Image: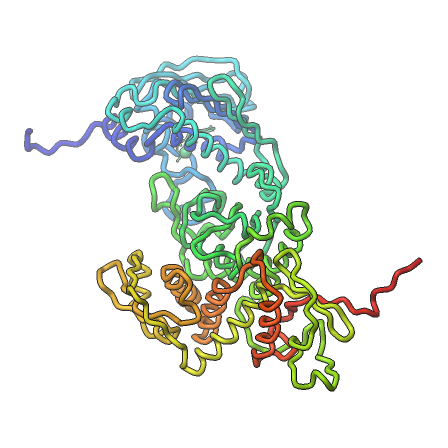
Amino acid sequence: MCDDIRLLEDSLIDKIAAGEVVSRPASVVKELVENSLDAGADRIDVEISNGGLGSIVVIDNGKGMTRSNAQLCTSRHATSKLSRFEELAELQSFGFRGEALAAIVSVSRWAIQTRRTDDPVGTRISSEGSRPAAVADIGCAPGTRIEIAELFFNVPARLQFLKSTTTENSHIAEVVMNAALANPQVHFRLVRDGRLIRDYQRHNDHLSRASSILRESTMLPFRVKHEEVSIEAALAPPERARSNSSGLRILVNRRPVKDRGLAHALAFAYGSVMPPGRYPFGALFIEVPAAEIDVNVHPQKTEIRFAKPRRILDIVSRSLSKELAKSNWLNIARHSNEGAANASQRPPGFYPAMAQHLSEGILSLNQKQTSYGSPNLDSQSQSLGFFAQLRFIAQLKNMYILCEGQDALYILDQHAADERIRFAKLHKAFTEGSVTKQRLLFPERVTLDPKRMAYALEHHEALESLGIESRAIADDALLIDEVPAQLAHLSVELLINDALSEITHTAQRSFSDRMDTVLATMACHASRSAGDAMSAHECKALLSALDEVSDFQGHCHHDQPIAHTLAFSDIVIHS
Ligand code: ADP
Ligand code: MG
């Protein structure tokens, strides 16, 4: 090797750059589609063969290029979208680096056809790699057609890194789907090996496009605007949640992004109905002023940086949690045809009481009158509490407890009731500093990612006050010696993760509010599930335990009752 320093040739620089911008056929599709969108197209056809390695053709009806622009567009740093650095912050277009075409053509055989509406004749330019291109007149429709054939023909090493044709096909389909989600007003078609496989017709808005693309009938639309941040989301109910964020599409200013923070914030907005570690299914669209984000942090622009990340996360979780609370998913689930059959598979927190937590954002202990009013005790039952004096009739569907009171029938939600009892007990013990702990027979090791590990150390005392005794035994692991006795039957890992998520995710709230949420989540997990068969004895014990919860003698601490009532006086049969 020679030690002399020399400047790299442009064609070599382009090829090296291609390694960053064009990692696989799908990235070519992404860049070409973005150029078509930047050109104002409302119809974009993508045709691929052999996983995009045979050819990729993108045809648009955008504004097209003049001949001189067409000749320039494949040069490095040739862009029509940016001329001064100051514009970068306000940029609305997808592209601005002027790198994509230069990089793509440097590693392919290619042809560009383009015509502006006003030009009588179009231009065709073709070549292979960075060789001087041939230019010719061509009769063509207004717009641009770019064909990239034999991608990586001159960088065989890269071909070896590509996966199967099927994998590349699915990456391409993903790119087109994301583009379609982000741009509902554009008609997209994807043709694969001569067969039309996707046809995304135009829609008026993101949400109707999202529901037609994601094909999930349970999704509901949500729209909120907080100051200059607009949020639209099409979201499925919590029982459709997934254990990773793969079912969640996030677009910020029309760019699909992978952002764990946002995925978390959205999961958090569901509150306790979202089991820890799971993520909602759906699509989240966020629009912020261009100056609020930096898209220039990743060559493929799949990551963005918010100027004030904390604030955006906060807005997403707070404003969506309010909206989600209005969703009334509980009723939908119960009244739908499969509702009854599916009910036992619902995540444990999916109950009115918990839906109410969403609307409040936090659990509050303010006592409020429930719809079933004050107990109306007769002399005999004076010593019994309100719930204990109800006459137990039956357990229904292994979910509800049917009881007769003096003036009404009561239908209690067994999970919600049990959860309420456990929460109140935990809360009492916690506030009195008397959480009963249980020593584990075999201390349990819990592995945590670095962030959670740091939280665990930082919040060691909070964990201790919740009844969790832990010590660090490695950079990424805690050893748990003791857990709250009431929760000893739960998985230790779940317990720790619940506690850490809630303690840390809500840093802006007061400590006691946060602890209430932790306790509520724990109570929810510890509670008897819907679907558990209960004996008459157990049902009666549950009723008595409700009375023991000093916080509500016939009242509950949410607007949402844990029981429905049917007053006898309302049972009027019209003949
Ligand atoms: P960038 O998009 O960052 O500007 P590109 O290399 O992707 O860089 O494209 C270079 C230029 O070529 C663009 O700025 C645009 O002027 C022009 N161009 C590329 N594709 C199209 C298209 N489909 N329609 C119209 N103009 C295009
Ligand atoms: Mg571009």
Quadrant assignment for ligand 2: top left
Residue shown at 39% from the left, 15% from the top:
135
Which of 167 and 38 lies nearest the eye of the viewer? 167
Residue 212 location, x and y as percent? 60, 37
Residue 165 occupies quadrant: top left
Query: Residue 214, relative to residue 543: is it above or below?
Result: above
Residue closest to the eye, 481 or 72:
481
Q: Compared to 390, does 505 lie above or below?
A: above
Image-based side of 1 in relation to 333, left or right: left
Q: Is residue 231 visible?
A: no
Q: Position of residue 121 (x, y in %)?
A: 51, 16
Residue 35 picture location, percent across and down:
45, 32
Tell me the residue at 35%/18% (across/down).
150
The residue furthest right is 575
| Quadrant (top left/top right/bottom left/bottom right) for the N terminus | top left
Q: Is residue 507 above or below residue 250?
A: below
In the rendered image, residue 500, in percent from the top left (x then y), is placed at 38, 64
How many marks the image carries: the answer is 0
Q: Which residue is drawn at the image coordinates 28% and 60% (left, top)?
A: 445
Q: Report the front residue among 563 and 461.
A: 563
In the image, is 547 to the left or to the right of 242? Answer: right
Confirm whether residue 138 shows in the render: yes
